[in-house]
Image (cartoon, rainbow, N blue to C red):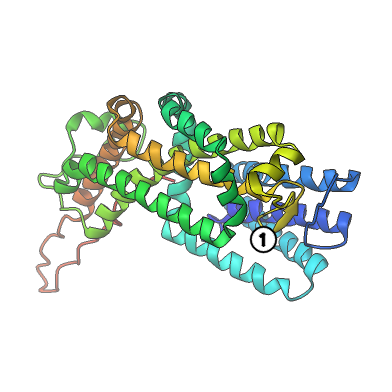
Amino acid sequence: MWLRSAPAFAGYATLMVCALMIFSLTGQTDINVAGEPTTVEWAVLTIMLVALPLGATIGWLVSLLRTQRARFTTATAAIAVASVCGLVSDGPSQLINIGLTVLVLLGLTASGIGSVLGWAVRLMLSHLAAVGALAVRALPVVLLTVLVFFNGNVWLMAATISRTRLWLAIGFLVAVAGSFLLTGTLERARPILRAANAPPEHAKRLAGTPFESMPDPPRADKLSIGERLNIVFVLAASQLVQILMVALVTAAVFFALGLILLSPELLAVWTRNGSSDGTLLFMKLPVPQALIQMALFLGALTFMYISARAVGDGEYRSKFLDPLIDDLQGMLIARNRYRGKTNVPAAPDMSGAAPTERVRSPGLRARS
């Protein structure tokens, strides 16, 4: 698990280095930018903007390492760097948080969730054309959100409601969207879940792998409950990541539009003299709180609409979901061939000893 977690450790260490840079510039771990930002505060905001993309890039570069020694050294060095950054910025108490973070990352790696999400992101990046087409089909909700964006009562709600209530509302919308998506996913995945056999034409996906030369078993084992849940999770997670990308882009567009249009006078009229400073990720920024909450709310609305739209969109399914199901069919053939090879009972022992116990293969899992 330590070696497989090296990319996550490297990304986490990068974020800790960025946090240390902010601490060295401001002398504190809390970020409080009020009014017109100074030169130092602009530098802090720049570090905040590049921290996540930089961490993701560093993690991707570490994932390209092939030798165990290189991965072990990188993982160990990353945790050491993160620990030093935590000690300098927050003292020894930060080591507890770092230890808990390491345990969480190891747990995500062991459970396979990290691999599935990484695979979903790579799949989404390989289908950017489908993302663009999906964004175009989201034009009705964009028009709707424009009407919401220029509605004074909604701005008053965004300025008045607490962040806790807003997250509850967003969670409700995401849950509704998830139910739409899960229903459609179960419908499309039902043939795979019912039968463990996959059409033979998908065997060409195993070209160049150790499974290519393995024969097909006469009878495939039924999928276990864990394997069925894994299939549904892979299909749902990959779609959620793609739809989330569209929702985030929509929220960013309206956030930028608000920065352009909102003057102090207009903000005072729409929000009844609401705060001109806002909080995001526990950081105080010189951005109206109402604008931040409005962007989050519009992103959640977009997420719900596109989730419902994707379920009934035949072109979206043919361009994105069907290739994903075909990929799973290929992995299903590999799973059946592997189990057919390892589940063959041993020849009878003439000495009277008990036959060798059959070796069970691991369940069907998404490729990392």
* The one of 210 and 266 positioned closer to us in this rendering: 266
Amino acid type, callout 1: Thr
| Residue that badge 1 annotates | 76
At mark 1, the secondary structure is helix
Q: Residues within 10 Å of mark 1 (few under 14, many from 20)?
A: some
- Does residue 66 appear anywhere in the picture? no
Q: Residue 26's image quarter?
A: bottom right
Q: Is residue 220 visible?
A: yes
Q: What residue is drawn where x is 29% and y is 26%?
A: 318
Q: Position of residue 227 (x, y in %)?
A: 27, 54
Query: Residue placed at 74% from the left, 55% from the top?
Result: 284
Q: Is residue 151 above or below residue 353?
A: above
Viewer-side residue, 145 vs 181: 145
Residue at the spot 64% in from the left edge and 57% down from the top edge: 75
Say left or right for 203 vs 355.
Answer: right
Residue at (56% x, 39% y) in the render? 251
- In the rendered picture of this protein, how many numbered marks are placed on residues? 1
Image coordinates of residue 66 in percent, x first then y, are: 56, 45
Residue 133 against residue 170 in the figure, above or below: above
| For residue 315, side relative to residue 62 (left or right) | left
224 relative to 9 in the view: left or right: left
Q: Position of residue 7 (x, y in %)?
A: 59, 50
In the image: residue 264, left or right of residue 164: right
Above/below status of 338 relative to 226: above
Of 100 and 252, which appears nearest the observer? 252
Quarter of the rendering containing residue 229? bottom left
Instruction: Give the image location of residue 116, x and y in percent.
Output: 42, 48
